[in-house]
Image: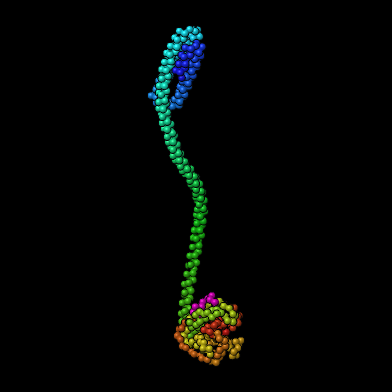
Amino acid sequence: VVSTQSTGIKSLMSRTNIHTIDSLTRTRANIDQQLKDLEEKQKQFEKTFSQGTNTNNRVREEIERLNAKVRSQKTEFQKIYTRINEIERETSRTRNTSSSRNLGNELDDLNRRLLQQQKAMLDLQLDYSRKWQRVYWEIRKIKSTIRSLIWFGVILALIFGGLWLDQYHRWFNLREKTSSIKLLLDFSVMRLDELSVRMGVQEKETEYIKQAWTATSQKLEAVVTQLNDTYERTLLNYETLKNLDDKLLRIHGQRAWYFLGCWPAGTKIQIDSIGNSLPVEEIFKGSLVWNPVLGKTVPVLRSITGPETGYIWKFTTEDHLTVRVTETHPMKILGVPNSPSSWMNLAAKDVMEGNWTLTENGPQKIVVIERIPVIEQMVFNFEYDLPDLTVINDRTVIADGFHTFDFFAQRQHK
């Protein structure tokens, strides 16, 4: 642009001085604009360079050298600018052709100088471009490094943050567990205190129980001693009575002499309304026996047993039932055949064939009476738990299907 402007100035000045002055004015304006553009590019480059202040010193030195060249070029442009002003003033004073020719030659020199400066500016621009590319890539590398460092820092922050959160959660859970354990320990201490108090009370109660047990043991020992004495006396009395009974039996020969009528072992005694029975030897005090007259079971007041020597009476009726008893056992005999209300209480030895009695089948005639000799055969009997004034008929017992009476009834036929 400067070269074109100088050529135009030279041609114009060869034609007319007025045109030369105008061309010089336009050339000066163009030079001013180029200087401004060069300053703006230098400022822009310095601003860009200031963003990469972390580049190495070698690049910084090269940039400084370029700036020095730019400043020298600006100085040269200032000199050219000053000379153009001088030419403008001389042109305004001089109007002849020789002066214009000299000014044209000088303008040629200025044009050459401008071309040299333009070439230098192009070289500077190339250097600026190369240096700018190097700075750009250095900045890219730095930015990439910074970005990598930032991501690395973020990853480390996430890792350590996760570890910290994990440790925090562990610590929080540990604190919660510690609080729970502390509460549990406090509760356990309270429970231990309560247990200690209870243990104290239990120890006192245990001591009291021990004392009571000692006293009770002493009383029990006294009672046991008394029972042993009573048992020994009872055994002595039993032996005495047994010896006496044996002596009497040897004298009189049979239990009938004592009016002890009984059933031999194996006799079936009815114990309920549906016909169930037990052997007479299994009837004891408190046992329940069926009473057909009262229509209910009656408890046994006492039972007796002993050996029998003499005869056992065996009765057989028309319905083929049989029963065996001792000779003084009370038998239920009907005074009028087929009339249960006409009963009588007779000892077995006073019953005769043809008499009527009651069985589980109703009134029956006794068809056979047998006497069976025995020697010390065990026989059994019992007494109902009924008042003494009870009617004898209310003391009926069913034995082997026969209606007979209990032990109390034989006192009436004594």
Image quadrant containing the C terminus: bottom right
Q: In this view, does 136 lie to the left or right of 345?
A: left
* Residue 250 shows in this picture: no
For the residue pair 318 and 324, the one nearer the viewer reads as 318
Q: Residue at x 49, y 78 (%)?
A: 282
Q: Residue at x 44, y 9 (%)?
A: 102
- Tally of numbered tags: 0
Depicted 413 relative to depicted 192: above or below: below
49 within the magenta span: no
For the residue pair 287 and 117, the one nearer the viewer reads as 117
281 within the magenta span: yes
* Residue 7 shows in this picture: yes
Q: x, y percentage for residue 382?
A: 53, 79
Q: x, y percentage for residue 150?
A: 44, 34
Q: x, y percentage for residue 247?
A: 46, 82
**Residue pushed farthest left?**
58
Depicted 209 relative to depicted 71: above or below: below
Q: Residue at x 49, y 69 (%)?
A: 227
For the residue pair 36 and 116, the one nearer the viewer reads as 116
User: What residue span does the magenta drawing correspond to?
Assistant: 280-289
Depicted 332 relative to depicted 70: above or below: below
